Image (tube, helix red, strand yellow):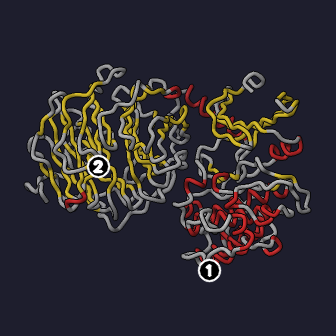
Amino acid sequence: MAARRPEYSLGEELGSGGYGLVLMATHREMGSPSAIKGMPGTTAEARLLAGLDHPHVVRVYDSFKYSVQHSGGPGDLYLIVMEYLPGGTLQTRRNSLSPEQSCAVGLAAAAGLEHAHERGLLHRDVKPANILFAEDGTLKVCDFGLAKLFEGSPVRTSNVVGTEPYMAPEQFTRDGLTRATDVYALGVVLYQLLTRRLPFDPRGPKPMWRAHIEDEPPHMTGVHDRLAQVILRALEKNPADRHAHAAEFAMDLAQAATDIYQPGWAGKSRTGLPLNLTGLPEELIDIIRGPTGPHKAAVPHVSQVDQISRVTQRTRSLTENRSPVWPTGETRRPDPGVPASRAFGGPLRGHEESVHAVAFSSARPILASAGADQTIRLWNLTSPADPRIFGRPLPGHTGAVLSLAFSPEAEILASAGADSVIRLWDLTDPTAPVHVGKALRGHTGQVNSVAFSPDGRTLASGGKDETVRLWDVTNPATTRPIRAPLRGHTGRVLSVAFSRDGQTLASASADRTVRLWDLTDRAAPQLLGERLDGHVGWVYSVAFSPHQSILASSSINVSLRATSTVSLWDVASPAAPRFLSEPLRARRAAVNAVAFSPAGNILASAGCDQVVRLWDTTAPADPRPLGEPLRGHAGWVNSVAFSQYGDVLASAGEDGTVRLWPTRHHGAGPHTSFQGRSGDDRRS
């Protein structure tokens, strides 16, 4: 491939198996990522695969045939260039989907299968691992490696092929296969999404093939009867008793879901999944959206030409040094539960689940947020009282996103999370973020924290594998690890932070300690001094003051009535740090996040008591609370961050919202609006 198609730059292996081999590839001129699959097959099969063109089927850009020699003699190898799908598989998401989201998955997959069936192709291996997501969250039916041609009449095969938990009875008995065979598999997928279990347990007393042929699926506990009827019809033993077409299954599913969740349930604001029903009857769209809804697809078809056009426009805007156009987005309605004098309007609702991280750009009024829904949101805060969303969420992670960090120039955003990878995003144009380079892999467990050095050349990360890693991000497109992982903890690393000069790195751990690392020579980092201990439990967060040699750390011990402390350390001499004052303590108010204001005189802390507290650290040996706690979240507060000028504080919560708090009077310079100390209530 590399020799015959030099216009593609080949990258890492994305997958392999009986269907062939899939490699990452980048078109040298376009710069856009693709996936290239090499597979054996007949000319007709390869042509049909390349001819599939539907928003919910993996898009094929090109195909080539080569004559090759192998041990069995000459043969043909087919290479198919497909769209790259960084959003992960349904397998990784299936336990976190709501019933509405599960139904949207069923409709999207049915639309893709109907398109394939209409073109004479049975999939024969529909399962969560073969359903992937594009960058914008669009579902794609993929991996037609076991696909079989048919011309309307049942297809008979000599081999039993498929994945047992999702195979229809006729696949085991080698009877004729029809469209209803794929409908059965999709029914199993929906059964699993809605009940969190397979209809037939692979570890059960009966062989899987006998259970599919002989047993009735168990009652779908906890699933509305209307939905259960649709799914169980798709799982009928006799193909003639099932939905004959994927489109018929979609119609039945849409009617049931609309009866339960009301018209409009399938909109992206409700499900987070762009839905395109191209090729299905207009009656189905009427059912979902209501008779007065628009008869058009929710997501436009994006061709390869459109992609090239976007790349060209982006390149032109960069070369002409134009400022990006900031979209209007959606206006946030004020929340009557929070007085306007205490918060900027209402909560920012852009995530479907809890929000784990917030981070501000240091150069532009941009806020990034990320959470358990595996996405990242960008917010235009030109007017904090009227925040707007920049475009679509940034997908790519296949687990909860736990940490965010902007580079000093604010053009690169780093994200990390439960999928054990770190991703870098180019935000030169925040309306069209671009994933930079490859995902950074090295941690063997979830990545809990990332931080950029002040010069932007180094990225630090800490993970569940008890290590700290350093990455050279001088050129983000070719990021590489800097020497071996740093090992100094005996528990998972929960937070990392750089000092203001970038020569010291702090790491916090579940081993109840903070370690300091000398990065004067980042190629040879060294541990500094002894462990910073004395914490009551796991140390969840560390933060350096931007203008003072102060380090803040927060720890929690849930066994002691959720007792927590915030400790302030004098790190003017990193090799000999010392306590600055008695720890700031709170009962039943576990603190899992701390952040300093840009001026360094205000410390924000937040945790499970659902509030944010501000502390005046002008005299770090005698920190005092500033005003009353900031209330508004309806769950744990997971992260806090100050804006570039310190005039806005953002907080992220388990309630799925982000809140913005003003921290100074308009035009009043650095003076905080939370003036006046409320007394020495550090033990409150």
The kind of residue tagged 1 is: Asp
On screen, residue 476 versus residue 611, left or right, reads right
Mark seen at residue 171:
none
The numbered mark, 2 or 1, whose residue comes first in the sequence reads 1
Residue 447, position as x, y percentages in the image:
42, 42
Residue 495 visible in the current orientation: yes
The quarter of the picture where residue 610 lies is bottom left
Contact between labelled residues 1 and 2, with CB atoms less than 8 Å apart? no
The quadrant the N terminus occupies is top right
User: Which of these two is toward me, 483 or 3?
Assistant: 483
**Residue 610 drawn above or below residue 437:** below
Residue 83, position as x, y percentages in the image:
69, 41
What residue is shown with label 1?
225
On screen, residue 64 versus residue 609, left or right, reads right
The kind of residue tagged 2 is: Ala
Mark seen at residue 593:
2
- Say which residue appears at 76% left-offset and 49% top-offset: 144
Q: CA distance from mark 2 to mark 1?
A: 44 Å
- Say which residue appears at 11% left-offset and 53% top-offset: 677
- Say which residue appears at 19% left-offset and 57% top-offset: 563
How crowded is the residue under tag 2: few (<14 C-alpha within 10 Å), some, or many (20+)? Answer: many
Label 2 element class: strand
On screen, residue 317 versus residue 521, left or right, reads right
User: Which of these two is toward me, 243 or 315?
Assistant: 243
Residue 297, position as x, y percentages in the image:
70, 58
